[in-house]
Image (cartoon, rainbow, N blue to C red):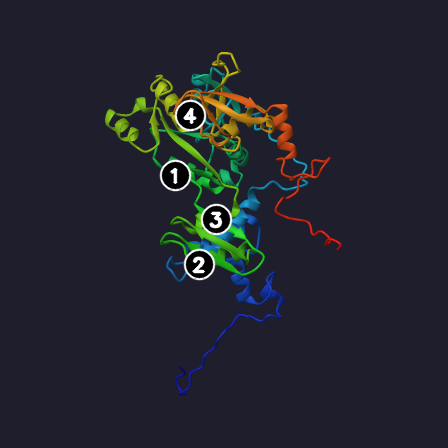
Amino acid sequence: RMANCDCIVIVVVMASFSKTSSKAGSGASGGGWAKAKHQSMGGGGSLIERIQAIELEMARTQKNKATASHLGSLKAKLCQLKRELLEPASGGGGKKCPGFEVQKMGDARIGLVGFPSVGKSSLLTAFTGQESEAAAYEFTTLTCIPGVIYYNDVRIQLLDLPGIIVGASTGRGRGRQVIATAKSCDIILMVIDATKEDAQKEMLTKELDNVGIRLNKKPPNVTVKETKGGGVKFNSTVPLTHFDQETCCSILKQYKMHNADVLVKEDITADEFIDVIDGNRKYCKCIYVYNKVDMLTEAQVDEIARREQSVVMSVSQKWNYDYLLKRLWDDMEIVRVYTKKKGCFPEFNDPLILTPQRGNKTFTVENAVLSLHRSMMDDFKHALIWGSSVKQSPQVVGKDHILHDEDVMQIVKMTQAEKAKASHGKKTGTTIAGSNIKVDPKKKEDKAPLKS
């Protein structure tokens, strides 16, 4: 306000938001407002910068019903960027990391995951006898060292992986190679130093979660079927508290799925729905092994031992080895099936091993036969089973019968006459005479009318 006049002078400085200004747009179609929105949605800069921009946008967005759709869209975009970050660049001529291409051997695989200097190498040596360098300094193990545990006639491969650091999911400290190897394991042992803070468990779980490894979780009971038209049809059989149709449509839009049938059979979140859409998640069991408990008091050890999925032990004092092996055996859900030839005793020295992670991930007779040889299902007629899975021993079962641990199985093949009958079909005109071409008997050929 001037002293000698009654007018007010207002000076307004406005940024250019013109769609035609190249400086205002700078990479995004539109002006300054389009640029700001483009960057907040992760559209500018490197992959790391775009991920950080989306995480910042999610952190400052209030969580309520009005913003649920927007947050779902951001989470879907963030998941796509993280997948691009983890996938190796095609056409690159970089050298492969030595020690991480470990051939699968044995009947199951266990991975030792943890921060540096928590006792992973000592645990490998104690269980397998395989020498792995151990010292009082961090990052002693620089490559993946395998060993084999022999337990209950089963060979279990144990992998000693290098220590993980914070930010391993983005590639720090060869973290991508370590976590990618952990993704191939049937079960994970997360080794934690009991003398340090409890945040180790949360940090390691977050690093594994960022690369698609879901610990101690089951796949969401959701069905998504892409269609040719009709838009998005959303149905649920249970009340939903964290997910709705609007959030579902915004996530599907990020994946360019505009026509789909979605059926939700349990109360899920937007993150779990994104896991279903991506389809590359690894659901794995995990046991939290607290090492160095000999340096704690009895009350502290008792409190840790009562936690869910936790085992306390001391590698240096050789405490609780037997219980850890028994816990591993129970959680891996291994089923041993002994095979038997006609007129002979069962082969108890070399059982077939069925696990939830291998084959078709079932404990059926079909999976057991396929583990012997794929061509055996062509001649399969039925099987004779002795054991706890049948009401009487022996009992004739089909390929869908569920086997129990330590069952005895005898495979019965089809004879040549039965194979010929199966290939030609029944004698009801279902094949063309002189060939193996099958014809549907319900479909009658239109014959010419009889001449009168």
Residue mark closest to the camera, 4 vs 2: 4
The residue carrying pointer 3 sits among few (fewer than 14), some (14 to 19) or many (20 or more) residues within 10 Å by Cα, namely some
Q: How far apart are labels 3 and 1 at the CA level?
A: 30 Å
Question: Is 445 placed left or right of 329 in the picture?
Answer: right
* Sequence order check, earlier mark of 4 and 3: 3
Residue 308 visible somewhere in the drawing:
yes
Residue 60 locus on image (x, y percent): 41, 57
Circle on res. 404 = 4
Q: Are marks 4 and 3 in contact (CB under 8 Å)?
A: no
Q: How far apart are labels 4 and 2 at the CA level?
A: 42 Å
The part of the image, by quadrant, that contains residue 87 is top right
* Sequence order check, earlier mark of 4 and 2: 2
Disc 3, SS: strand
| Residue beneath disc 3 | 223
Question: Vertical placement of 301 versus 18: above or below?
Answer: above
* Sequence order check, earlier mark of 3 and 1: 1
| Residue beneath disc 2 | 245
Which residue is pictured at 62% across the width and 70% down the height? Answer: 20
Q: Amino acid at mark 1?
A: Glu
Q: Amino acid at mark 3?
A: Thr
